[in-house]
Image (tube, rainbow, N blue to C red):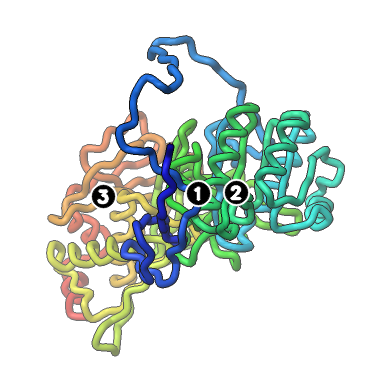
Amino acid sequence: MARVTEQYSCQNCGSSYRKWQGKCDACGEWNSIIEDTGREALPKGLSTGKGRHITFASLDQAEETHARHHCGLQELDRVLGGGFVPGSSVLIGGDPGIGKSTILLQAVGQMAKNGYRCTYISGEEATGQISMRAKRLGLAGSPVRLAAANSIRDIVTSIEKEDKPDLLVIDSIQTMYADNLDSAPGSVSQVRACSQELIRLAKKVQCALLLVGHVTKDGQIAGPRVLEHMVDTVLYFEGDRGHQFRILRAVKNRFGATDEIGVFEMTDKGLQEVANPSSLFLSNKDREISGASVFAGVEGTRPLLVEIQGLVAPSQQATPRRAVVGWDNSRLAMILAVLDARCGLSLAGNEVYLNVAGGLRVQEPAADLAVAAALVSSISDIPVPENSIIFGEIGLSGEVRAVGQTDARLKEAAKLGFTTAIIPMGSKVKDADLKIIEVEHLSEIVSLFTSEKQASGAQRV
């Protein structure tokens, strides 16, 4: 017989231990380790030949295609890779109040109006509260089946006995519990067990499963890290609650492109899709302002233009401030070091502020050249050349390296009325409609904004 073993796991990170201890060695949290009950260990000397024979398939078997379920929100369909795949599981996370429940209710409401069978199960709100929100969003007449439940056993039994849904929404997975476990809802063991049972149910009845996940103070989805490995797609809502724009990003997608983004605007009627995100992030394109450059980036498969703002100001402190919003702080430190060592621009005595306009977070190394241009423009008080875009990666020796998808970036810029592109030397450009300025070294960017006399004066600041 299988023997029951005592095992303890951390509720914060999911690390396992043979015995209880006060502090988790993996994440450093105190009093987060609890006992996992119901675990069974296989006895030693397990003999083979007693199990069920599994069927193997070849790689050249005929592909079984399933039509995707389009939700009616084009931005959400884009992030998912074309819509919901039957039998797949999607996990969406974000800060409280960012709009997770709103966009899910809009999605199921539109799908139900289009003839799909949609079921929305909430563990946090009553059905009356969801109905009130549906009326505000104009979805009161949508035939969505609502339920308020927390027991996984009740949910699975109801789904198997009722008409099989095309889309099942669980809001949220941290409020669900399995009655065969003694731990509280939201613990590592409960989240893992409930998610596994719901994913098994979705594959059995061939419905798309959408799970809502709470996030920790660090912005990561709460619960075991294995949850993100179990699901097929992981979506994160980004943006400041004080800002009207919301960005939905796919950080994992087995059926589409990763790092794909969808842009929404929060209004009193819910989340509205933004058809042209590039124009949304460009506020001062028609005005010449020093310290601002336009970066032509790529998010997933979508080219996106965004304004990068830099400010260099004298500091009275022994340690000048370095403040970054929407970009990597360590990468800014590298750009400042390269400007100092390779271009002779010493910014050690200045405060440096960098901001990505619109609340977008840029993760591409291709933004290096645009950041450097914004900083040089700020310290020289000379605007970036009018109607120009900039992109390129900077190496530690100051060389400017080529980046991918150059043509897509240039086409997006030409569509929005830009006339000049400052790009790395050696970029493969096909039939560009813009004036191309190729740079090989970061020092060439400095010469675009200031003369040698102005550069040496900036050195003494």
Residue type beneath disc 3: Glu
How far is the residue under mark 1 from the one under mark 3? 52 Å
Per the image, label 1 sits on a secondary structure element best described as: loop
Give the crowd class for mark 1: few <14, some 14-19, many >=20 residues within 10 Å.
few
Whether residues under marks 2 and 1 lie with C-beta atoms below 8 angstroms apart, the answer is yes
Spot occupied by residue 321 in the image (x, y as percentages of width and height): 32, 79
Which kind of residue does numbered mark 2 sit on?
Answer: Asn
Q: Which residue is mark 2?
A: 180
Precedes in sequence: disc 1 or disc 3 = 1
Q: Residue 157: give x, y in percent of width and height.
A: 71, 37
Image coords of residue 380 (percent x, y): 29, 71
Judging from the image, what secondary structure is the residue with disc 2 in? loop
- Tell me: 267 left or right of 42: right
Q: Earlier in the sequence, mark 2 or mark 1?
A: 1
Q: Are marks 2 and 3 in contact (CB under 8 Å)?
A: no
- The number of numbered discs placed on residues in the rendered structure image is 3
- Provide the residue designation for mark 3: 393
Q: Nearer the viewer, residue 140 or 200?
A: 200
